[in-house]
Image (spheres, rainbow, N blue to C red):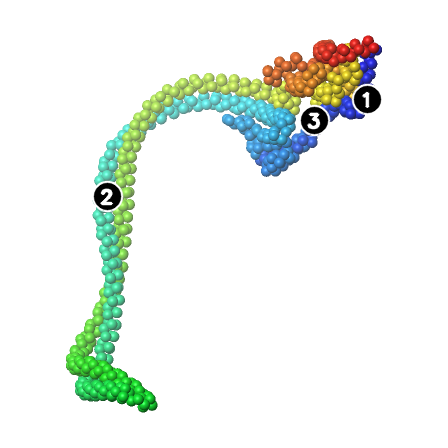
Amino acid sequence: MHTFRLLMQEIKAVTSNRKVLIPIIAVLFIPLLYSGMFLWAFWDPYDHLDDLPVAVVNNDKGATFEGEELHIGDDLVDKLKEKKQFDWHFVSQSEGEKGLKEQRYYMLIEIPEDFSKNATTLQDDHPKKLQLIYKPNEGFNFLSAQIGGTAVERIKTEVAKTLTETYAENMFENVKTLADGLTKASDGAKQLHDGLIDAKDGTNRLYDGMNKAQDGSNELYRHLATLAEKSITFTDGLHQAADGSMQVQTGVQTLHDGMKRMVDGQGQLLAGAQQAKEGTVKLALGTNRVLEGMKALDARMPQLLQGSEQLSGGTEKLVTSLAEWQQGATQVQTGATQVTSGLEQLAAQLNTLIAQTSDPAQKAVYEQLKQNVVQLSLGSKRVQGGVAQLNDGAKALQEGAASLSAGAKQLHEGHAALDSGVNELLAGQQQLADGANALVNGQEQLVSGMHTLHEKMQEAKQGTEKLASGGQTLASGLQALANGGDQLQDGTHRLADGAQQLANGMNELTNGTEALQAGMNQLADGSGELADKLKEGAEKASNVKANEDVYNMFAEPVKVKDKKINEVPNYGTGFTPYFLSLGLFVGALLLSIVFPLREPAGVPRSPFQWFFAKFGVLIGVGVLQALLADSVLLFGLDLQVKSVPLFLLFSVVTSITFLSVIQFLVTVFGDPGRFIGIVVLILQLTTSAGTFPLELIPRSLQHFNAWLPMTYSVFGLKAVISSGDFSFMWENVGKLLMFIVVMMAGTMTYFTIQHRRQFTTIVEQASEA
């Protein structure tokens, strides 16, 4: 009774304290949230594959196979449209690549442009396989890439099956064609047999003809030997003619080169004559113009003589006048000097009068008079200087006038001589003009003759070119004829040798006809047997059966029959043991946070009472957690199990196991115990074989599998949900109970130690009272 009293106190402490009660109620739903939400989300993802966007790019250009259009890419697209396996998006290459990068598609399936073309290469020396390019965006979602890879493999299998059926159908059609061909070959073999019988008779006639041909070949050899002897003389003559033609060709070529140089030189001469003609015309025009100028000069010469004579007389008069003017200027200069001297004397006298006069008015008059005298003296000096300059200029002018007078006399004399020379030059210029006109007429005749000569030289050059070309043709022809003669000589010798060989061969052929007769007999017998065998083969080939079942047998010779043991209908059922165990463990871990696992609600009378009070609350919460989660799985997600009661029982045992583990860790170690619980959870998630088989995880982690409780909770739940192996389930229940007992013993030991330390004295005092 005392034991249950402390348990009731613990329950009252929880229910009376909202801060504890509400978190505990929330913790009750943690396993439900973990297992329910995870399993609901991943219950059957393959049932929603038609919502998974996948891009399909069909670049197939088609091909022609045995005269028929082949579009395997289009056929594959049509089949994909019929089977809504994914949310297919049939797009272009650029749109598909863009959508894949922008994560609008999880994967891209590309049908290359040579898809149909490669299907027609089966009978080629190097057949090419059909390729489907599969581009998954694994970074976007790895599992979708794996699912897509499986789907692509199925598509590949279907395409291969279709192609094999097509090839099988064509093969059987070819077998039927072969049967028809064998029938025709059998008929042909029979015709061959009949023909060989006729050929056998012909070999006898051939033998007689060969004897006659042998006699003719001997006669042919004799005539060809005579022809070979005559061909030697004919060939020697041809070689001599060819050598002579080569010499003639050399002379003609030399003549042609000389004529070409003459034509080029005559062309240059003609150009020079043309230039000379133009020069003479210009010379005649110039001489005529000079003659006209000379005549005009001769007409002006009298006026020029008269002017020069007048110029000479005027310059003499100028010299006389300048001499007279120079004398007057000298007298003026002398008078100006005397005036200047008188004025200076007058100024000196006025200075004396100014000094002697005391009357201011008189003195002012003298001052004014003195200033006037000074100004006159300055003007007189300027006149004196100007006259001196004029006198110097007059001297220079007189000297120039004398020189001009002498020059004018010489000019007059020169004009007289010029007049005489102009008359003589005029007569010579007239003769020069007459000669220039005659030169122009002669140059025109020369140019005309040069033109005629140039035309004749061109005709002669063309003639030498034709002569050289004809000589070359003649030499080439004679050389070719000589070579032909050599070939004729060689051919006649070879023909003679061939005739000899023909005669020898005719002998051998005659002997061979005898062997041919024997072979024809054997060939006739063999052709009959060939016709019989071909007929038999045609009958067997015609009996070959070909229908859709046979084609399907070739395309899919092996069919895998799927016989599942302990079938799991969907992902959710398969993952329930893993996620339910995870949710119950997390619930136990969170319960240790909201419910005090050490502090008692009252004073425990014994360690067992303390342990029972705490463990009793945990059992109640653990049972409720398990039943809530199981209810949602069974009735909410329609989880199918082999036994509902055993499923509920095993879930409760699992929940109590995890609670005992957490109670021990947190009670003994406190907060570090919770951290250890998290580490244990992580190890269980990786080593419990709830997702991948144990053998697929690293070996270093496999050792933890047998030492952690979630391993056995997953095994037991798999047995009760999928396999129905209840004996294996009870085996795992026993192992979980071992964990419970060990954890309870550890917790009980801790409470015993702590009870001695904290409550022994209190309990003894209460008993004495």
* Residue 246: numbered disc: 2
Disc 2 versus disc 3: nearer the observer: 3
Residue at the location (68% across, 16% down)? 669
Task: Please give the name of the residue rendered at 28% of the width and 37% of the height, measured from the top-left corner.
Answer: 483
Q: Secondary structure at mark 3?
A: helix
Q: Tell me how many marks there are.
A: 3
The mark that comes first in sequence, 2 or 3, is 3
Looking at the picture, does residue 447 appear above or below residue 406? above
Badge number at residue 619: none
Could you say where residue 655 lies in the image, as x and y percent from the top left?
74, 17
Going from N to C along the chain, the mark reached first, 1 or 2, is 1
Q: Which mark is residue 45?
A: 3
Q: Is residue 417 above or below residue 531?
A: below
Residue at the far front in the pictured view:
358
Q: Quadrant of residue 146?
A: top right
The mark lying in front, picked from 1 and 2, is 1
Toward the viewer: 194 or 693? Answer: 693
Q: Amino acid at mark 1?
A: Thr
Is the residue marked by circle 1 packed among few (<14), some (14-19), or many (20+) residues within 10 Å? Answer: some
Marks 1/3: CA distance? Answer: 42 Å
Please report whichever mark, 1 or 3, sits nearer to the chain's N-terminal start: 1
Q: Residues under labels 1 and 2: Cα distance?
A: 140 Å
Q: Pointer 1: what residue?
A: 15
- Local secondary structure at mark 1: helix
Amino acid carrying mark 2 in the image: Met
Q: Quadrant of residue 369?
A: bottom left
For the N terminus, which image quadrant? top right
Q: Residue 253's x, y, as percent?
A: 24, 48
Disc 1, disc 2: CB below 8 Å?
A: no
Which one is closest to the eye, mark 1 or mark 3?
A: 1
